[in-house]
Image (tube, rainbow, N blue to C red):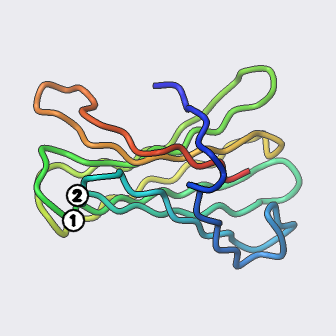
């Protein structure tokens, strides 16, 4: 599933606990946009720069309503197209939360996130807006 562009007016701002959008140290927390018209998943995450060339990304999804499955995905990619992703998927059960973490080696990459609703046949039934974190 390829990220799509979302108008900046629909992208909530990241909540920074570090020193800037891409801190030299510290952690930046962010929220993932809700899926319009569906109140079944909420998601959030964070990233932390580790030294000069690595970053640690954590994504969490919480099922907040009735759905077969819900989740959130963070996709990091660089200008040459190399990518890494981290996902958090929750199977049925309102109130349950799942998190995933990955450390990757190209801090100059871009990071985009979105939430999704999974169908019973292994497909993605609906996705939320994509938010660019950096």
Q: Quadrant of residue 50?
A: bottom right
- Residue visible at 43% across and 53% down in the picture: 100
- Residue visible at 29% across and 63% down in the picture: 62
- Would you call the spot at circle 1 few (<14 residues within 10 Å), some (14-19), or many (20 or more)? some
- Label count reads 2
Q: Position of residue 3 (x, y in %)?
A: 55, 32
Q: Quadrant of the N terminus?
A: top left
* Foreground residue among 26 and 93: 93
Q: Quadrant of residue 42?
A: bottom left
| Residue where numbered disc 1 is placed | 64
Dot 1: element: loop
Say which label, 1 or 2, has the lower sequence index.
2
Taking 23 as reference, is 108 above or below it?
above
- Residue visible at 34% across and 52% down in the picture: 36
Dot 2: element: loop
Residue furthest to the bottom: 17
Q: Position of residue 39 (x, y in %)?
A: 24, 60
| Residue where numbered disc 2 is placed | 40
Q: Position of residue 121 (x, y in %)?
A: 13, 25
Asked whether, in this view, residue 116 is left or right of residue 94, the answer is right
Determine contact: label 1, label 2, CB under 8 Å: yes
Taking 132 as reference, is 76 above or below it?
above
């Amino acid at each position: 599933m390829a990220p799509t562009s979302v108008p900046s007016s629909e992208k909530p701002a990241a909540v920074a606990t570090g020193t800037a959008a891409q801190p030299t140290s510290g952690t930046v927390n962010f929220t993932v946009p809700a899926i319009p018209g569906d109140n079944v998943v909420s998601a959030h995450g964070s990233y932390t720069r580790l030294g000069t060339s690595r970053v640690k990304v954590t994504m969490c999804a919480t099922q907040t309503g009735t759905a077969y499955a819900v989740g959130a995905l963070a996709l990091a990619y660089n200008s040459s197209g190399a990518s890494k992703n981290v996902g958090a998927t929750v199977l049925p059960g309102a109130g349950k939360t799942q998190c995933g973490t990955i450390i990757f080696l190209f801090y100059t990459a871009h990071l985009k996130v979105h939430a999704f609703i999974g169908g019973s046949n292994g497909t993605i039934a609906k996705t939320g807006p994509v938010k660019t974190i950096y």
